Amino acid sequence: MEKNKNLIVVLGGGESGVGAALLAKKMGLKIFVSDSGIIQNKYKKILSKNRIHFEEKGHTESIIFQNAIKVIKSPGISRQDPLIKKINFLNIPMVSELEFGKSYLKNSYIISITGSNGKTTTSYIVYKILQKEGFHVEIAGNIGRSFSREVLKKKDVYVLEVSSFQLDDCYNFRSNIAVLLNITRDHLDRYHNDIESYISSKFRISTQQNKEDIFIYNHDDPLIRKGFKKYPILSNCIPFSIQEELCVGAYLKENKIFFRNKFNQERCLLHVDKIPLKGDHNLYNILASVLVSVTLNVRKTSMIHPILGLKSIEHRMEKVLNINGVQFINDSKATNVNAVFYALKSMKAPTIWIAGGKDKGNDYREILPLVKEKVKAIIFLGKNNKKFISFFQDVIDIIFETNSLKKAVRMAYILSIHGDNILLSPACSSFDLFQNYKERGLRFKQEVRKLFYEYEKNRYFEIFKRR
């Protein structure tokens, strides 16, 4: 590669990195994509087609250090990575893909949504509402679509799901509307097991806002309220709550969703019983979505129609199959304790809980009462379950562990009786056995379907024998 001093280096050859590379190429910049792992074939084809130089299975540091004027870091790369430390030491500017994409937008309206849980669901609801209202809108970010690639489409409004990892590398990223859904103990393995650092990361979503912008937040969340004392918010703050009636904001009253503005004018928007997605966690997501919609003067009909048509997002409380009266539920997206809390809370039948994976500094005390009340057996799936087992062994009599998802599914079914639930809700990340939560969820569904086919085949032969 020709040496130069105007090279944009993209670290990471996944969705985020490739999207940034495509945008940079379109803007006439010289690009080099570098990945320590293996780049998926679909991304290699895109890079090759667009004549973007790339490398995989390692970083050529000489190219980066001698030629880079800017580094775009994919969110999956830790700040503690040795390469990142060297780049910082050399004072090479480094930004997130989000910030890079935003730098090429002048007039688009940005709605950013973050939180430990509910980001995907809330982003999707807001997107569908604005689409229904007729906005020229796109959805991107942590949801699995590169923001930088979507910037090329030049939409009027962007709804972005934003993770703490993405926010960590944002310095000038400004959202017209920022939404903070909740903060729970999550990803603490990336934050030196320091909850304060994680709170700080989440509040970065509001750092660049001004008095013309909107900050929507969960009034019921104690860690968010704690953050308010430390991180000043310059934008207009609008809360939502399911626990109390608010002077301003969105809240529940008489089993209905209400909004009250600063002039003390109250509007009833929707009856809770009509919402197809059940559970407090979904109510929080819908309240936040309602506030975004009201702020943008969306008509009530455009707001209600998408909410009433909601279906469970894949890997989030997704009903897979019912086999002989036993319901299998895929909640692979529940990668922290708070997500599991709401999953268990929604269980109306005895539950066999499949959990485990890469622990992120979890504190399981939050779910202990629900485990006692709802769970009849636990199957731990992962390479190291010592922390899990030591915490729950005095609470649950039946505990098994395995490295095989196939064994976990079949073991759970053997332990079940008619009317039980089998819930995959890991409380941990998937990286010890799987690439990500999506692969874990898909594999779970595959194993459940295999079990179903075997059950149906055996049932057929039993019927045939009787004849």
Image: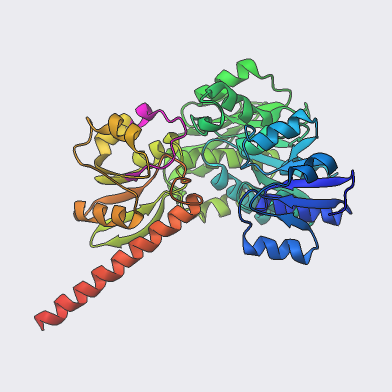
Quarter of image, res 45? bottom right
223 vs 432, nearest the viewer: 432
- Residue at 46% from the left image edge and 46% from the top image edge: 430
Magenta region includes residue 365: yes
- Residue at figure coordinates x 51%, y 51% from the top left: 435
| Residue 216 position within the rendered picture, expressed as x and y whole percent measured from the top left | 63, 32
Q: Which one is nearer the viewer's eye here, 76 or 130?
A: 76
Quadrant position of the C terminus in the picture:
bottom left
> As drawn, is 135 to the left or to the right of 248?
right
Check the image and report above or below for 42 versus 354: below
Residue 254 in view here = no
- Quadrant of the snapshot with the N terminus: bottom right
Residue drawn at x 75%, y 64% as measured from the top left: 48
Residue 217 image-quadrant placement: top right
Name the spot of residue 226 as percent of width and height, x first. Answer: 56, 18
User: Is 122 one of the magenta-colored residues?
Assistant: no
Q: Quadrant of residue 68?
A: top right
Q: Residue at x 54, y 42 (%)?
A: 286
Q: Out of 91 and 313, give the one closest to the viewer.
A: 91
Of all residues shown, which one is farthest toward the top? 229
Segment colored magenta: 354-367
- Farthest-out residue, bottom: 467
Residue 222 in the image: state x and y as whole percent.
Answer: 50, 22
Q: Position of residue 402 (x, y in %)?
A: 30, 48
391 up-or-down from 149: above or below = above
Q: Specify whether residue 24 is in view.
A: yes
Q: Nearer the viewer, residue 272 or 218?
A: 218
